[in-house]
Amino acid sequence: METFDYVIVGGGTAGCVLADRLTENGRHTVLVLEAGGKDDGFWIRIPAGFSKLLTGARYNWRFETEPEDNTLMRRIVVPRGKGLGGSSLINGMIFVRGQAQDFDAWAQSGAIGWSHADVLPYFKKLETFEDGESETRGGSGPMHVERVKLKAELAEAFISAGEQAGFPRNPDYNAGSQDGFGYYQVTQKGGRRWSAADAYLRRAETRPNLSIRTGAHVTGLRLEGRKVTGVDYRVGKQAMSVEVRGEVVMAAGAVQTPQLLELSGIGDPEHLKSVGIEVRHALPGVGNNYRDHFCTRMNWRVKQPITLNEQARGLPLVASVLQYFATRTGILTLGTGLAHAFVKTRPELETPDVQFFFMHASYANAADRALDKQPGMTIGVTQLRPDSVGSIHVKSADPYAMPSIRPNFLSARGDAETLIEGMKTARRVIDQPAMDPYRAYEMSPGPTVVTDEDWLHFAKSNGQTIYHPIGTCAMGIGPRAVVDPTLKAHGLEGLRIVDASVMPLMVSANTEAAVLMVAEKGADLILRDARGGASRAA
Ligand SMILES: Cc1cc2nc3c(=O)[nH]c(=O)nc-3n(C[C@H](O)[C@H](O)[C@H](O)COP(=O)(O)OP(=O)(O)OC[C@H]3O[C@@H](n4cnc5c(N)ncnc54)[C@H](O)[C@@H]3O)c2cc1C
């Protein structure tokens, strides 16, 4: 059987960082096993291809939630990237680090060594920000971060309306304070998507000590007692195995990392027995502590033909395509967000608790992003730090079966209250004079939605995930923690987890930046142990 020093399960966002960093010094052999294919699709590079990738199957696992009361028994689509680059291949490219307090809360919850002061150097290390290096921003990292390339008239009006409603204008929400309105920053280079594979794998893939296998679906871990000794996987119908000298590093993401642990007999014994899987190691936290961002979309009819709804069809679209290929500017550089707002729904709050995603476009159905024909605009409203906690567990021992995803959205009373206040704030912003030349009328939820009960019903019937599952193998020190602060699985030898699943609490942000940071720090922790150094995270 083949043997490697490290086997990385999943060549996604974190997997690409790990593949690069663990092979950089040339001392270790590394194998990446990725179930999806290469990242060579046409729509990947063009940011506006986002909507195609969201609905297509080639780069997307397309999971869905179980029906739940709080979301009126709707099955909500849970897209997850599939292929080298993982979810960074299909995501909306919005780059937000989060608030300093998020990481301080991680450290306080038991993730010692992950406070803001500890993680800031990794956030700086991972990025090349368009404006260059500063005290808070990085200027020479592999991930390129640019400001959105478009300054639309309607977005300018939205930002001015935010100021009229009493919020500040904020030119860089990643530099300290998140508060206020402005334009998003995106993971792009020269107007093209810059995935984790572009950033980290391209420069590493020719190294002789790195092997990358695509189409390799991992089916479970090999264990001898408490030691993880390798990985079983399948390429097509062929079953294969690989041995590991050092560690298996799980980077299959917040949905599939807990799934693979459970398939290997690692998890809550009661649950494993209930689905007929032999218990190899009891870790009751596996698959629990699942958190996600729940987002409602409010939209308005616009008086003037200055929105994507008209610009992304017919002759204007042809002109935009030519503009994009000539200059890498224009509407094709847009992913999911144009202008942002981070707002406090109560003035006494220390930091914002709600995020807005403003687009000069409207969709009848957020899940497929088909644009309306008449001019429109949308504000996505999300609560930044939800307390609602759900779970992701296998339903059977079949490695190809979809796991049971139960987000439990809006189950914490405070989450519903914050979201309702957030939606009211969005309506208040659009009611400002700066929007008078543009606002025709509110289409959704519409003026008949007035009471808190109305708003809650709208959220339950309309809200979706914005694709940020985390926490299903949470880092910490208590009995529910799955990994310790060095990302080693509790009670096992030879197993680390380095992906979105280890985040103990939600960050006030879209999650890619934090995943990249976790992977940069995770790689450092692994290499430190390989050098025989201290294994403490601090
Ligand atoms: C549609 C969408 C839009 C998003 N928009 C944004 C955004 O605008 N900004 C932002 O910051 N974040 C966004 N996110 C979230 C962000 O992209 C993720 O949090 C992050 O990329 C997750 O990284 P990861 O390494 O944990 O998992 P992933 O990047 O998902 O990687 C997991 C990898 O493991 C592979 N894998 C899974 N199971 C197996 C198996 N059994 N065998 C082998 N390989 C396996 C998968 O194919 C995948 O490549 C979005 C996500 C999605 C899906």
Image (cartoon, rainbow, N blue to C red):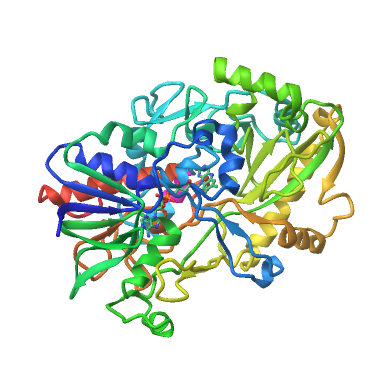
Using residue 45 as the reference point, say whether residue 374 is left or right of it.
Answer: right
Q: Position of residue 445 (x, y in %)?
A: 81, 51
Residue beneath the point at 43% across and 47% down: 86
Q: Residue furthest front?
A: 237
Is residue 473 shown to the viewer in this render?
no
Is residue 443 shown to the viewer in this render?
yes
Q: Which residues are magenta?
A: 99-103
Q: Is 534 above or below relative to 394?
A: above
Q: Residue furthest top?
A: 326
Using residue 504 as the reference point, say whether residue 409 is left or right of it.
Answer: right
Q: Position of residue 448 (x, y in %)?
A: 89, 54
Residue beneath the point at 48% across and 37% down: 41
Q: Position of residue 148 (x, y in %)?
A: 57, 27
Magenta highlight on residue 102? yes
Magenta highlight on residue 360? no
Which quadrant of the figure contains the N terminus? bottom left
Using residue 434 as the reference point, say whether residue 328 is left or right of it.
Answer: left
